[in-house]
Image (tube, rainbow, N blue to C red):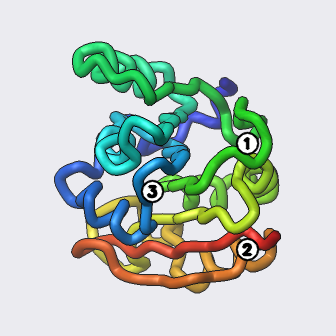
Amino acid sequence: MTEKHRHMHHGKTSKNILSAGDVLKATQLKLGASFLDAGCGDGYISLEALNIVGNNGNVYALDVYPESIETVKKEIKTRNLGNMETILADITETIPLDAEILDIVLMANVLHGFVAEGEVKEVMNNISRVLKPGGVFAVVEFRKVEDNIGPPYDVKVSPEDVSNILLENGFDISDTQLVGKYHYIVNGVKKP
């Protein structure tokens, strides 16, 4: 990982302000699904996803930071979880999974960083490659309002910004909704 990819807010968790259950309900994650948490951080959403997909589903927790992946690995070991894998990777370069194997890719509080760095195209290409046709790319971001929660206002992206990114990269928008007090989610469906 190059130093330029070290996001200034890495290592922070949204666990206290963003409910994993609310996010996953908004993605319509189901039993038996294959799910990727892209930029998983401490893995709290990935771990909740595992409860939903059950024994026949798969959860992949991906992050560029070794510290985050180590935290998730410890949880997997402590809980003796079998169908959850960690992936240490830079999503601007690759997602080391087979093509078209995922039902849902979630990216929570991460896309704004790629927008700020001008790396959206690479990220979207990698996500599109691993999602099944008809699969959902669910983007959660901080609401674009002036407050002290999340990244600075000028780095935040609006639901319209996210929708446009998805539309420009081969997705249809299925819905946009608020999740919790500070966040929204945009669900994009990969065109066949």
Relative to 103, residue 28 above or below: below
Amino acid under label 2?
Phe
Q: Which mark is residue 67?
A: none
Amino acid under label 3?
Asn
Which of the two labelled residues, at mark 2 and mark 1, occupies the earlier sequence position?
1
Residue ranking furthest to the left: 16
Quadrant in the picture for residue 111: bottom right
Q: CA distance from mark 2 to mark 1?
A: 19 Å
The residue sitting at 55% across, 46% down in the picture is: 34
Amino acid under label 1?
Thr
Q: Which residue is mark 2?
A: 171
Q: Which residue is mark 1?
A: 92
Which of the two labelled residues, at mark 3 and mark 1, occupies the earlier sequence position?
1
Q: CA distance from mark 3 to mark 2?
A: 19 Å
Which of the two labelled residues, at mark 3 and mark 2, occupies the earlier sequence position?
3
Q: Position of residue 117 (x, y in %)?
A: 68, 53
